[in-house]
Amino acid sequence: MTVKMKMHKQIICILLVGMFFLTSCGKKSTESVIEPQSKSFFAMDTYMMITAYGKNAESALNQAEDKIEKLEKLWSVTDENSEIYAMNHSNGNTVSVSPETVELLDFSLNVSEMTDGALDCTIYPILTEWGFTTSEYKVPTDEKISELLKNTGYKKINLDGNNVIVPENMQIDLGAVGKGYTGDLVTEVLKENGVTSALLDLGGNIQTIGTKPDGTDWKLGLRSPFDEGNFATLEISDCAVITSGGYERYFVGDDGESYWHILDPKTGKPAQSGLVSVTVVGKEGRLCDALSTSLFVMGLDKAEKLWKQHDNFEMVLVAENGEIYITEGLEDDFSLNEIYGNLEVNVVRR
Amino acid sequence: MKHKKIWIKVCILIFTVGIIGSLYLIFHPHGQIVNIIQDGKILYTIDLEQAEDQMIYIEYQGSKNVIQIQERQICVIDAECPDQTCVKMGELKSNATPIVCLPNKLVIEFAENDDIDAEVK
């Protein structure tokens, strides 16, 4: 073999190796990528997106949507065929409800007890008076609020087995826990279908099954209560993350004041606890949903006290002065986004 | 001998095209593909990098949304609904936060994911 021929062979080899590397730097091998199945739809007065991984994911997602549709029909306040509607229009008579509604109402009443009434499913008529259920906002007079407050109070609701009595002139709405509990029930449906990795975004209420298929945590942005951005990211797996914030639904009155939809059940007015956003992280969506509203009403000190008494949730609280409080269980999962680096982060310890 | 030279030239040509192609893929700005969806159906798929400034009018059961594309940004500038949430949301910024008009079942979202999986709100 001549020197020239050897050189030609070497050039061909180099070119072939180069071409191999060029072709391998594009997409990952399709064999190693698990394709997600996604479904998005409108339900429970919000936009929902569910992404699931697994060979039965498509069928699981269809069942999940059916489940949500069924639960919405049970718990809608406005649907004349719903169980909530039946209770609210029973004139104080006993109404028999489904096991799902019993479970949801029982849970809601327990959290009301646990939070000393910071969560109260009976304030629906006051929420309506403010216009938060119809988007026809107005500031009610103090007299009107006092009058409506007489017909509120979770302790007046009677739940016995599957029989419920909502007293005459009272109305309930389980919206503060309904989406969280829906997340729990849909998670069960997905798991029963063999889904081991999924992200449920139920109108901003997030619930996850497992980790991402590559084994890494889900990366969630926490909405800033001060602007449109995400002030922090949380890296979590296999849990629910739910936020309540004054920025979600509010209006500016003729007096120039902002009024948000999270009402203090004791005053019938927007909660003024010094907190502007509360995020709760835990295994149960229903607990996260219920507590995010309750802790917003309770404020920093009472929220910290409640957290120290229970070990089944963690929280991120944002105060109106911009200070952030995270509980120690989230210390490694929480990171403040760079542009919000001026906000002070305090770690709450047991 | 002549046969080998041709092969070398073919390989060099493929190699060069490969390098140019790779560099193009790496450095060419990715399109900002946006889907406009109504009641689960994709009405429009638009690349904001390529799209001309325009208004898109979408009607749902007699109620209208006016979508504006201007300087590679998309937003809803008018909506015939009581809450006006979609208008207040301003420009579409993240895949985790689609522009949503609940009364008119309208969603505007990026077709590709960004760095977070979802926004808690």
Image (tube, coloured by chain):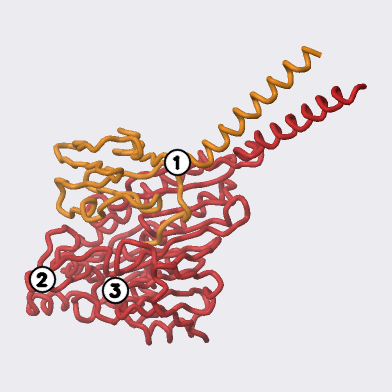
Chain colours: A red, B orange
- Name above or below for residue A261 compared with residue A183: below
Which residue is located at x 22 percent, y 62 percent? A88
Asked if the residue under mark 1 is in contact with the one under mark 2, i.e. CB atoms within 8 Å, the reply is: no
Mark 2 Cα within 10 Å, few/some/many (few <14, many 20+)? Answer: some
Residue B118 seen from this side:
yes
Residue A296 or residue A333, whichever sits in front: A333
Which residue is located at x 83 percent, y 28 percent? A7
Element under disc 3: loop
Disc 2 and disc 1: Cα gap in Å? 48 Å
The label shown at residue B30 is: 1
Spot the residue most to the top.
Answer: B2
Which residue is located at x 81 percent, y 25 percent? A8
Residue A48 or residue A245, whichever sits in front: A245
Three-letter amino acid code at the position of disc 3: Asp
Residue A204 or residue A158, whichever sits in front: A204
B71 left or right, relative to A193: left
- Of discs 3 and 1, which sits in the foreground? 1
Number of callouts: 3
Subunit of label 2: A
Q: Which residue is mark 2?
A: A139
User: Which label's residue is closer to the chain start, 3 or 2?
Assistant: 3
Q: Which residue is mark 3?
A: A120
- Of discs 2 and 1, which sits in the foreground? 1
Three-letter amino acid code at the position of disc 2: Val
Please tell me in which quadrant of the rendered image residue B51 appears. top left
Subunit of label 1: B
Element under disc 1: loop
Q: Position of residue A57 (x, y in %)?
A: 54, 42
